[in-house]
């Protein structure tokens, strides 16, 4: 699962959305099958980010909300905040790169883009 997410991130950074989505879908399925909620939360976050980047805001909400629930359950406050921010920014219709004037939203958008996911310990839990 962890390798799939790494490959998905590379695809995301190189704007190969179809390949990224395939990796994310496989990572979510694998995380669910193995009961690894940390990996599932991270994969759902990446899934939401992909929808957000593609401006598919309606599709972004569900994986972001599910990720927030899992992060909250796991005690990953940074992950939870990322998912909550993503849900809020999506509801507000904020673009991936918020205008500089929207300081609070800009900081949240930066956090969405910079979050590296759960720690290795959380993934192995």
Image: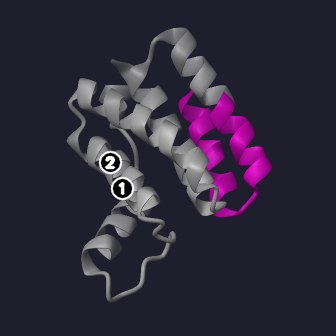
Which quadrant, please, contains the N terminus? top right
Q: Residue at x 36, y 32 (%)?
A: 120
Q: Give the structural element (helix, strand or loop) at label 1.
A: helix
Q: Is residue 111 visible?
A: yes
For the residues labelled 2 and 1, the Cα–Cα distance comes to 6 Å
Residue 122 in percent (x, y) is at 32, 27
**Contact check, label 2 and label 1, Cβ < 8 Å:** yes
Residue holding disc 2:
84
Range of magenta residues: 1-25
The residue most toward the bottom is: 101
Q: Residue at x 25, y 36 (%)?
A: 76
Q: Residues within 10 Å of mark 1 (few under 14, many from 20)?
A: some
Residue 92 in percent (x, y) is at 41, 64
Left or right of residue 60: residue 108:
left
Left or right of residue 101: residue 66:
right
Residue 71 colored magenta? no
Q: Which mark is residue 88?
A: 1
* Type of secondary structure dominating the magenta stretch: helix
Q: Is residue 45 visible?
A: no
Q: Which mark is residue 28?
A: none
Q: Give the structural element (helix, strand or loop) at label 2.
A: helix
> Residue 80 sits in which quadrant?
top left
Examine the rendered structure and indicate whether residue 33 appears above or below residue 60.
above
């Amino acid at each position: 699962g962890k390798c799939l997410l790494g490959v998905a991130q590379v695809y995301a950074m190189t704007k190969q959305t179809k390949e990224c989505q395939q990796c994310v879908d496989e990572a979510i399925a694998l995380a669910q099958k193995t009961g690894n909620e940390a990996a599932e939360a991270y994969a759902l976050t990446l899934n939401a980010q992909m929808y957000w980047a593609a401006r598919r805001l309606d599709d972004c909400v569900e994986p972001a909300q599910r990720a927030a629930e899992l992060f909250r359950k796991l005690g990953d406050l940074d992950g939870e905040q990322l998912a909550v921010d993503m849900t809020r920014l999506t509801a507000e219709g904020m673009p991936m790169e918020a205008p500089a004037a929207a300081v609070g939203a800009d900081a949240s958008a930066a956090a969405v883009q910079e979050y590296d996911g759960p720690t290795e310990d959380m993934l192995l839990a």
